[in-house]
Image (spheres, rainbow, N blue to C red):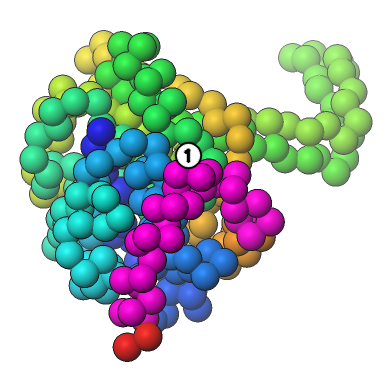
Amino acid sequence: MRAVVLAGGVGRRLRPHTLTIPKPLVPIDGTPILHIILAQLRGAGFTHVSLSLGHRAHMIEASFTGNQWAGLELDFFLEEEPLGTAGPLALLPPFEDSTLVMNADLLTDLDFAELIARHKKSQAAATVALSRQYIDIAHGVVELDDDREVTDFREKPRLSFLVNAGIYVLEPSLLRLLTPRVRDDMPALLDRARTEGERVEGHVIEGDWHDIGTPEQLNRAAAAFRNDRARYLGRGAAAVLGAGTGAFQEVGSG
């Protein structure tokens, strides 16, 4: 199985952590975010990962010291200008099969192999992983009808909604909707696909998902990872991580 990891972001919101290293190499409990993701992918049965790089690309490449890492075949593609979350896909060779595409600034215990299997079974052109998020309202909520008559009271309700988790499975046919070297984002690509009658399916993550965009979010993700590494890595990914982290430590120590 093949995956694409979008690792070209600058990480301005994550400063000061990203003042000296690129966002994908910011550590979670001592391990770079990107290395955790790759270990998870290898543990799920992926064998080939393409990394789309931009900001400080040389540092990310150096953290792997080659095109093989813990049993994964890696290749690197450079965005000379930021191309968004979909545009970089036009730089890659055509997909041969259903391909996982994901951002490099997240932590999740999602079973990536199961996601691929569900996507194939659905026969959708794309599957979007979703995370259920909650907002607690500190006040009572009142609803009115068109005549300003009160129709409902809800005391301090908890609202829920689904957010894009930055993880997708795409069919090769979707790449025809991209223009090479033109900035494009995944929501726009999937909207075009739906306009053309393609099925875009959602998959709700039942476990954990953490966006790592700010120092506060990084701290929450690091605490979750530290408290239950086995939940995120499992036996297979933990073994992969142990085999693959030496290259980063060697680069970092220099």
- In the rendered image, residue 160 lying in the magenta stretch gets the answer no
Above or below, 165 against 17 in this view is: above
Is 146 left or right of 236, judged from the image as shown? right
Q: Check the image and name the residue furthest to the bottom.
A: 254
Percent position (x, y) of residue 72?
25, 49
The C terminus sits in image quarter: bottom left
Q: Is residue 84 visible?
A: no
Is 88 left or right of 91, judged from the image as shown? right
Magenta-highlighted residues: 224-252
Is 177 left or right of 141, judged from the image as shown? left
- Identified at 45% across, 44% down, the residue is 236
Toward the viewer: 139 or 225?
Answer: 225
The rendered magenta stretch, by its main secondary structure, is classed as helix
Q: Secondary structure at mark 1?
A: strand
Above or below, 169 against 7 in this view is: above
Mark 1 highlights which residue?
Answer: 165
Q: Could you tell me the amino acid type at mark 1? A: Ala
Percent position (x, y) of residue 77?
15, 55
Percent position (x, y) of residue 74?
20, 53
